[in-house]
Amino acid sequence: MVAMSLHKELIFLILQFCDEEELKQTAHMLQHETGIFFDMKYFEDLLLGGNWDEAERYLSGFSGVEEDKYSIKVYFEIRKQKFLEALDKHDTAKALDILVKDLKVFAPSNEELYKEMTHLLTLDDFRKHSSLSTYGDMMSARIRMMNEVKNVLEASPLFHDKLKFPDINKSRLRRLINQSLNWQHVLCTYPQPDPSIKTLFMDHQCPLPDQPCDHSIEINPLLSNDPSTTSSPFSGKSNCDPSTVTQSIVSDGDLNLGVSTNLDTNLKDGKDSDDMFKIRSTGTSEELTSPITFPSQSHSSALHIPDDLPKAVGRILNLGSSPTSMDFHPIQQTFILVGTNVGDIELWEVISGEKLLSRKFRVWKIDEISVTFLENLVKDPCVSVNRILWSPDGSLFGVAYSKHIVQLYSYHGGRKIRNQLEVDAHVGGVNDLAFSKPNKQLLLITCGDDKLVQVWDVISGAKQYTFEGHGAPVYTVCPHVKETIHFIFSTSTNGEIKAWLYDNMGSRVAYDTPGHCCMRMAYGADGKRDGVSYIVEWDQTEGYLMRTYVGLHKCSAGVVQFDTSKNRFLAAGDDHLIKVWDVDNCELLTTIDADGDLPASPYIRFNKKGTFLAVFANYNRIKILANCHGLQLLQMSEDCPTNAFTALSETLVSISISTAAESRLTDKAVPVKGDTETLEDGQPGSTAAPADILETRNLSKIHAPSQLQSLRLPSEVKISKVCGIFKLSQKTSYL
């Protein structure tokens, strides 16, 4: 019985493969010969098109003419319609042939009906017969006949389990083949980093070390529409880079997210391999009991710890409550946003250690939020920050709360923020948020306990898309773009990974993580790594592990938090330590204790340049680790008056934000709402003009270029703004 069930499922997988490869006739032939699945849509198209012989041939694979009363009814209705259409065309000879050859079989069971049909041959117009007076035109008669046939088939016991195709993940057969090949590769005595798979007819085995390795991968023409094209936003490019362990062997024409021919073509033209880092939470499964490593992955046994890795504690920020999320400003990289377990948000300048602003949680517009949220808030007024995040240009930041809502602020430099948008986004907690910009429109992506992923317009707050399909609360979202194709990865607490395009066509990729448990993911700095005890590099197309980083504690408390720096370092908070890897080496590079007092799984965050690494510490603190350059900046702040350094930082970031905002005006700029908020819930803070700062502040102790603030200009700025910044830089350099 089990063997028969698996045989049936294999037929379904082959039918799915034929459909994905546009092998329609082959699929229909297989359906007819196996009798496993009856394609009602195909059968309907045949009958409505008048393809009577082909319709009967297809039907014969499932039921004979006299199989049962249902079959007799179906065949009779089809042949009767064919007979009447011959009469309607005044083709008496053909009608007589149908009567004698096709309808004769029904005469014994209903002789009177057969005589009446014979009588129709003598009429000039068969519609004069009382039972056919409402026949109408040919197409309407075919539609009525088809509805009758469909009702009979649905009632027939022979068809009750053959009319619905099972729910199968896309390209399931491809995935099974790739999993088999990768498992074979794992068992190789000498696994090569880039295996050469030339055939599916034999088990794969990597050659011995003294045998030459063929660096090409041949794609089976049966498994690809275009053998010359092997990549997509979710598929890797064939190469022999030792940093890659295995890759998708079978061409994946239907996992490239698209629904149209143009989109498919764009996806297949992708050049780079996009892989993922995934961190799994602990204690829920033993499916992967030991990490898989390969000899080719190891670098030198004596690993050198680079000087540019932040590893010395240079500053400690003391918060009033326990931090839960943080993010460095993408432009002014010494500014860090922090969210806490009581819903507070704070902005700190890490060099001076000064808190620039603080705001407590409050609902902006009570009349615009749901009754469910209000009821939950009354029952339990405690609200914490689940995620706080800057937009890519640093002019906005979003806050996802543990109850229902997301708040969006516009940032105008220094101590100035304004209320931008408040959205009652999810029923329950909002677990994560992200920004994305498909079609040059800035969007906010959220996910929550209600198992949904939502996409919002940051200007109006209008909901753009709702993605449904996860079977558990959605824990994280990760937008990405490749070859102009924008898509979103999402993961749920039961370990599902799904990928979505910005449309309403459902998920394009769905697979499970090892252990089927909660995880977080993020793409690396160059967009080629997607990153969530395991820490693994994960193939986003087929869902197999490319590299497993060793050194995590086996019983990590909760989801291990991680971050990457310049696509060079991978760091994770685990076992009261910060553990660091070279992203291309599975062996642990080093551990950092940050002078102790770290929680079991501390949250960590690099700034964009990798100068600083922030880490949560016990007693409501954040420790700022710095590399050599960062320590110089911190030393400079100790030599200079704090207010002078902060004023200069605020001026520079204000210029940066305003310039970035102006460059965005051609791209649907985000209008701001509400009043400006400053330090400590709206208390006004002072900012000086650039000229005043340079002329009155004591900056005489700036001697080295490394002590100066740096500023990256956007690609499009007004000339007057560039001139102003140039003059400021000149004067600063002179001092």
Image (tube, rainbow, N blue to C red):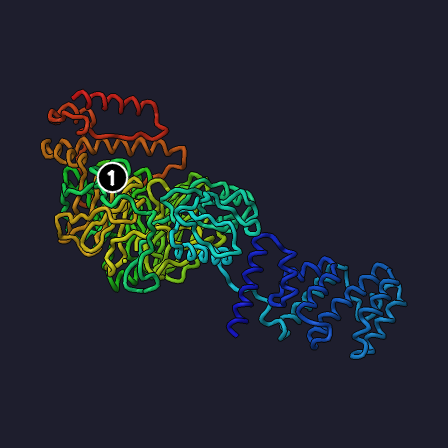
The one nearer the camera, 379 or 593, is 593
Left of 341 or right of it: where is 168?
right
Tell me: residue 332, above or below residue 20. Answer: above
User: Could you tell whether 623 is left or right of 433 in the image?
Assistant: left
Q: Is residue 121 above or below residue 535?
A: below
Q: Where residue 87 sits in the image (x, y, percent)? A: 84, 63
Q: Amino acid at mark 1?
A: Gly
- For image coordinates 67% across by 61% down, the residue present is 44
Q: Where, by quadrant of the figure, is residue 289 drawn?
A: bottom left
Mark 1: secondary structure:
loop
Residue 569 in percent (x, y) is at 27, 43
Residue 375 % position (x, y):
30, 63
Q: Is residue 444 visible?
A: yes
Q: Is residue 697 above or below residue 167?
A: above
User: Viewer-proximal residue, 382 or 387?
Assistant: 387
Label total for image: 1
Q: Which residue is mark 1?
A: 610
Q: Is residue 430 visible?
A: no
Crowd tier of the residue under label 1, counting other residues whose Cα lies within 10 Å: few below 14, some 14–19, many 20 or above = many
**In front: 204, or 719?**
204
| 271 to 59, vertically: above or below | above
